[in-house]
Amino acid sequence: MKKPTSLTPLAAVLLGLFVATSSARAQLTQDFESFTANTPAPALSGWGANTADSISVVSSLVTSASGEVLAGSNSFLLTFDAAANTPPDFDIGGYYSGINGGAFTSIAPGDYTLTATFRALDPGFTTALNFYYTAFNADYSIQTTNVGLQSPFYSSADGTVSWTSGVFTINSDGPNFFTGLQTRAFVGSSAVNGARVVIDSVVLTAIPEPSSFALIAGFGTLLAVGIQRRRR
């Protein structure tokens, strides 16, 4: 955006506010570049893998191997075994509130979207990502937020895909919260061993409030008036 010349002082101030509020704000970006390659993510980073349902073996690490990295130098690699015709689910990047022993911060109230890039590296299964966030008050008697959004399912033939969730709302902060990503991987007629899913570029983005858009509209009107006055 080219900055107009000879702005009135008020228009100049509003231009600064416009730049600050005109685009959605990324609240969390995890591209795994700061992690040590080819090792598991640090225990308190919130990135790991937990077995669930029919999955008995699953491992994770930050990979820099050729053919496994989706962007930059590192990506997050999950490897699992599963019997035929089973719908395995397992959690990745899941974490809990500080009350439950984690060193994490709940998401501030507001509207958000989540974007993630991922790929099934091997044939024999399809995979999807599910983002979840639930929050409760101090004694768990009231659930303040419940979000569960899932991507479509993809196979290795689909290559690398980027999924952006629909807009979801986080309500007032709850001191007890649970959030993370869940991987779902439906296995076909043959068992899979060492099946790999790789994930990268996970971005949580805050959507500007309606008042921000009203400010943008007001700026546009005042800017136009200011320019017209200087041309007279």
Image: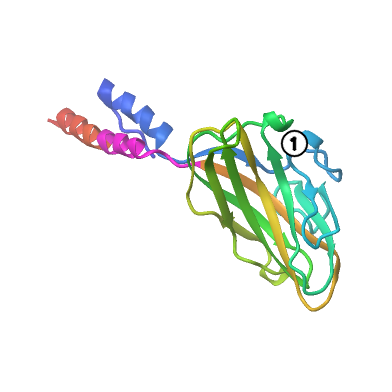
Mark 1 Cα-neighbour bin, 10 Å: few <14, some 14–19, many ≥20 = some
Q: Position of residue 74 (x, y in %)?
A: 76, 46
- Residue at 86 percent across and 58 percent down: it is 56
Q: Main secondary structure of the magenta part?
A: helix
- Label 1 sits on residue: 45
What is the x, y in percent for residue 145?
Answer: 53, 42
Residue 149 lies left or right of residue 56; in this view the side is left
Q: Front-most of 150 and 174?
A: 174
- Classify residue 159 by image quadrant: bottom right
The residue most toward the top is 9
Residue 101 in view of the camera: yes
Question: In the displayed structure, would residue 176 be above or below residue 60?
Answer: above
Rendered location of residue 209, percent (x, y): 39, 38
At horizontal 55% and vertical 54% (from top left) the residue drawn is: 164
Residue 210: in magenta span: yes
Q: Is residue 63 visible?
A: no
Name the image quarter holding the C terminus: top left
Identify which amino acid the numbered label 1 is placed on: Ser
Which is more toward the observer, 215 or 91? 91
Q: Secondary structure at mark 1?
A: helix
Give the residues drawn in magenta, as a range.
206-219
Q: Is residue 156 magenta?
A: no
Picture quarter containing residue 86? bottom right
Vertical arrangement, residue 73 with respect to residue 10, above or below: below
**Residue 191 falls in which quadrant of the image?**
bottom right
Q: Is residue 153 left or right of residue 5?
A: right
Q: Count up the numbered dots.
A: 1
Picture coordinates of residue 37, whole percent (x, y): 83, 43
| Above or below for 47 versus 11 | below
Identify the residue shown where x is 70% and y is 72%: 157
